[in-house]
Image: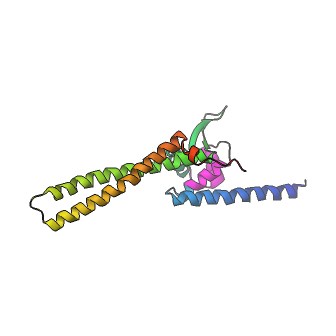
Amino acid sequence: MTNHHEESSRQTIEHAKGLVIDSIAETMDLYGVTRSAGTLYGTMYFEDDMTLDEMREKLGMSKPSMSTGVKKLQNYNIVKQTFRKGTRRQTFVAEKDFFNFFSNFFTKKWLREAKTNLDAIKDAQKELKKVMEDSEADEVVKQEADQVYQQLEASKPYYHWLQKLVDSIESGEIFDFLPVDQEK
């Protein structure tokens, strides 16, 4: 293979990686992760491990931005700190298994959604009960409070189902119902 042909092939490989990195960044942006953190994850996905300096060099971002992005990705448990033999610098590696990525990334968000909303519903229903039990409150107002109370009550099964979904993903039980196709 000539040097020119090899160079062209390498450029094609980098372009192909870039397409996937961009789609990962766009997808993560849909779920509330900054596009730059998504680009960072996508870039790390194709690397064995990287230092902050290597990330900065590859992406042209500042070291503080890299550090912030890495911390956010670590919080989702989709980037882990590693150690490279012979160096004292921190290195980081991205989760390569998208099933683990899915489990780590989405379950945290879903549990947060369920907890936040169930807590708010509990507090709201306490307040609504006070209105419903208030002997001096107007009947129309009590009915409105009861209607809102019942509407909130009807939303609880969704949040409990979401918690069960998370449990089934974390335990792997979901794969009994939705097996992973082994096709490539």
Where on the picture, by quarter, is residue 9?
Answer: bottom right
- Can residue 73 be seen in the rendering of this structure? no
Could you tell me residue 117's position as x and y percent? 35, 53
| Residue at 73%, 59% in the rendered image | 15
Q: Nearer the viewer, residue 84 or 12?
A: 12
Taking the view exactly as shown, the residue that stands out farthest to the bottom is: 140
Task: State left or right for residue 116 relative to residue 83.
Answer: left
Prevailing SS of the magenta stretch: helix
Would you say residue 123 sits in the magenta stretch?
Answer: no
Q: Height in image: 101 above or below 138?
A: above
| In the image: residue 156, left or right of residue 56 | left
Residue that appears at 61% across and 48% down: 98
**Residue extent of the magenta highlight:** 37-63
Q: Is residue 42 shown in magenta?
A: yes
Q: Nearer the viewer, residue 140 or 61?
A: 140
Of 171 and 40, nearer the camera is 171
Residue 24: image x %, image y %? 61, 56
Residue 81: x %, y % from top left: 57, 38
